[in-house]
Image (cartoon, helix red, strand yellow):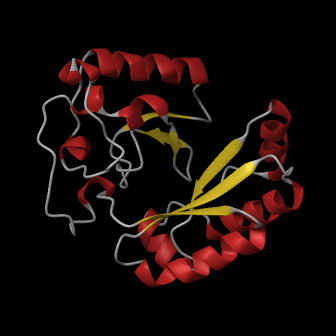
Amino acid sequence: GVFLTPEKQKELIESGIDQIQVSYLTCNESVYNDLTGNRGDFNSLNFNLQKLSEIKPADLRVQLNFIDLGVNHRSFSLVKEAALNWDFDIFYRREHSRGGLNTRSLHMLETDDCCFRCGTFASVHFITSDGNIILCCNDAKAVNILSNITSSDYASMLKNKLKIMLKNTEFDVCKRCTDDYRWHSLFDVI
């Protein structure tokens, strides 16, 4: 959301995009700074979301993604209220490992082919508030940076992801993931 400036919003809307998702973990600036490691910009995030609410066409779905990390649990009601005020949808995730930062889950997945079997890495591109493209939202500390949107083009980023998947690279953050969006390869089913 920090890079989702009014100019970028107009560009995305004109491109025909039908959905925008923004992680929104708290309405409290100090909690936000803790969660982003002081890499975000709380005021820009909120300014951009306010502007988006003012210009979004009726057919554009905007969703705030709230992930309950424990430390922000009490923030959900305020985040939900903000989403409603902006006419955005809200997505609440009760459990998510955030790369092992949320250790409330007692189960961990045991696999040697994490990226190969994970649909998130292949299908979704996560951009941090400072422009880094990271593996997925589970890489909360942005340890595995693929590239940066300010210095890399989209095609290069996709080629890099494909190379990683073909090499079946395993990242530590994948080993600790409990995200229930993960799925097994079709080869395991056939």
Picture residue at 20% right of the left edge, 64% below the top:
105
The spot of residue 152 in percent (x, y) is 57, 26
Does any portion of residue 1 appear in the rendered image? Answer: no
Q: Residue 119 lies in what quarter of the image?
A: top left
Q: Nearer the viewer, residue 126 or 57?
A: 57
The spot of residue 187 in percent (x, y) is 22, 18
Q: Against 108, is 111 above or below?
A: above
| 116 left or right, relative to 41 | left
Q: Against 175, is 93 above or below?
A: below
Q: Quadrant of the C terminus?
A: top left
Picture residue at 61% right of the left edge, 75% below the top:
80
Q: How many marks?
A: 0
Picture residue at 43% right of the left edge, 72% below the top:
34
Q: Nearer the viewer, residue 17 or 58?
A: 58
Does any portion of residue 107 appear in the rendered image? Answer: yes
Q: Against 41, is 61 above or below?
A: above
The spot of residue 57 in percent (x, y) is 86, 50
Q: Quadrant of the N terminus?
A: bottom right
Report the residue that reaches farthest toward the bottom.
Answer: 74
Report the residue that reaches farthest toward the front.
Answer: 190
Q: Residue 161 lies in what quarter of the image?
A: top left
| 54 left or right, relative to 159 | right
| 179 left or right, relative to 106 | right
The spot of residue 45 in percent (x, y) is 67, 63
Picture residue at 60% right of the left edge, 55% below the top:
22
Q: Against 84, is 160 above or below?
A: above
